[in-house]
Image (cartoon, rainbow, N blue to C red):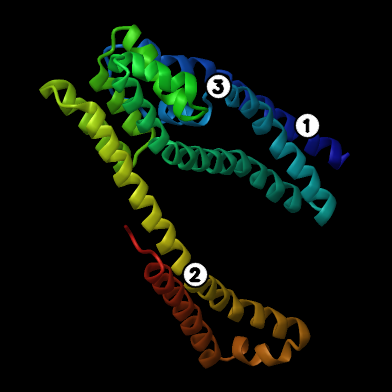
């Protein structure tokens, strides 16, 4: 009876989530309908770079099934309602985490394609094509996600939206210093009549060298990051092992006031150490 009640509750919650997410296609089309508004609110930005193309069709089933499945698993593992509720909450968080991971991977792939995209634009301009035609060549030759993003710029331009506004939206969807530098150079060159071919070649070389230096820095700081992770979790693992092997060793720390103060001091010191190690291993290029 209890299992049936849990299934009914989570099915109701799944139907409610489905009703809330049924408006997703409208959110996807709204940025293209608002021709005069160059600003994007947060749901529109998430929809554009997280649910572009076929990805949007996969999210509603994931949002519906995830809480139900994790709730059932939690109930089976813990044999109580609290485990089912904890599993349902975890299931509600999983789609959001999945979207953030996909978004992060998509942005990283987009930025890794910038150099190749600049070289295609430069070669197309050398061949005598216009900037708009060069963008069309880039969309045809390059894979996703850079083809999606610049394809959206082409569609917006055909609908009457200015290049300045389209590139501003692109910077909001894919924020980075390299892309901001590229879009600024494009807009300035279009206004002042600069040589875009030379500009693209110089930008491609600069981004390539910056990426090479970033990879070297990441390689050199790998050992420090691993040491920080190990040293951060070692005291926690050691305390868990001692508590499991002989709880009397920690009972004195938990029962006395001085022991509790020392434990609080150890936790605070651990957090400070994790924060400092994280800061020391982050080197901006």
Mark 2 / mark 1, whichever is N-terminal? 1
| Residue at the extreme right of the image, as rendered | 1
**Residue 123 or residue 143, whichever sits in front:** 123
Q: Is residue 106 above or below residue 189?
A: below
Q: In the figure, 58 relative to 151: above or below?
A: below
Say which residue label 3 marks: 53
Q: Position of residue 157 (x, y in %)?
A: 32, 12
Q: Secondary structure at mark 3?
A: loop
Query: Is residue 13 visible to us here?
Result: no
Q: x, y percentage for residue 92?
A: 63, 40
Which residue is rendered at x = 66% and y = 88% of the image? 250
Circle 2 sits on which residue?
225
Q: CA distance from mark 2 to mark 1?
A: 46 Å
User: Neighbour class for label 1 at 10 Å: few (<14), some, many (≥20)?
Assistant: few
What is the crowding at mark 3: few (fewer than 14 residues within 10 Å), some, or many (at least 20)?
Answer: few
Residue 212 location (% of width, % of height): 40, 54
Q: Which corner quadrant holds the N terminus? A: top right
Number of marks present in the image shown? 3
Is 49 placed left or right of 236 in the picture?
A: left
On screen, residue 12 versus residue 19, left or right, reads: right
- Is 247 situated left or right of 1 in this image? left
Residue at image position (49%, 39%) is: 109
Q: Is residue 10 visible?
A: yes
Front residue of 150 and 267: 150
Instruction: Look at the image and tell me in which quarter the C terminus lies.
Output: bottom left
Q: CA distance from mark 1 to mark 3?
A: 33 Å
Residue 204, quarter of picture: top left
Which residue bears the numbered disc 1?
8
> Judging from the image, what secondary structure is the residue with disc 1 in?
helix
Q: Which mark is residue 249?
A: none
């Amino acid at each position: 009876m209890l299992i049936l009640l849990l299934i009914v509750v989570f099915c109701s919650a799944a139907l409610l989530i489905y009703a809330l997410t049924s408006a997703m296609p409208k959110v996807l089309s709204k940025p293209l309908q608002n021709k005069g508004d160059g600003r994007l609110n947060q749901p529109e930005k998430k929809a554009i770079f997280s649910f572009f193309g076929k990805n949007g069709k996969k999210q509603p089933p994931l949002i519906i099934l995830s809480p139900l499945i994790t709730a059932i698993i939690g109930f089976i593992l813990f044999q109580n309602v609290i485990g089912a509720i904890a599993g349902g909450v975890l299931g509600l968080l999983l789609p959001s985490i999945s979207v953030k991971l996909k978004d992060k991977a998509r942005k990283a792939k987009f930025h890794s394609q910038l150099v190749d995209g600049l070289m295609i634009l430069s070669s197309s301009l050398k061949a005598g094509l216009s900037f708009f035609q060069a963008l069309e060549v880039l969309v045809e030759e390059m894979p996703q996600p850079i083809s999606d993003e610049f394809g959206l710029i082409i569609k917006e331009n055909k609908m009457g939206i200015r290049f300045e506004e389209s590139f501003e939206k692109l910077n909001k969807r894919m924020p980075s210093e390299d892309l901001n530098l590229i879009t600024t150079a494009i807009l300035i060159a279009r206004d002042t009549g600069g040589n875009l071919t030379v500009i693209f070649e110089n930008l491609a070389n600069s981004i390539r060298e910056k990426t090479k230096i970033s990879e070297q820095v990441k390689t050199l700081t790998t050992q420090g990051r691993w040491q920080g992770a190990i040293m951060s979790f070692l005291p926690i693992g050691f305390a868990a092992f001692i508590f499991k092997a002989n709880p009397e060793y920690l009972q004195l720390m938990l029962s006395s006031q001085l022991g509790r103060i020392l434990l609080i001091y150890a936790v605070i010191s651990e957090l400070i150490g994790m924060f400092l190690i994280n800061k020391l291993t982050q080197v901006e290029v």
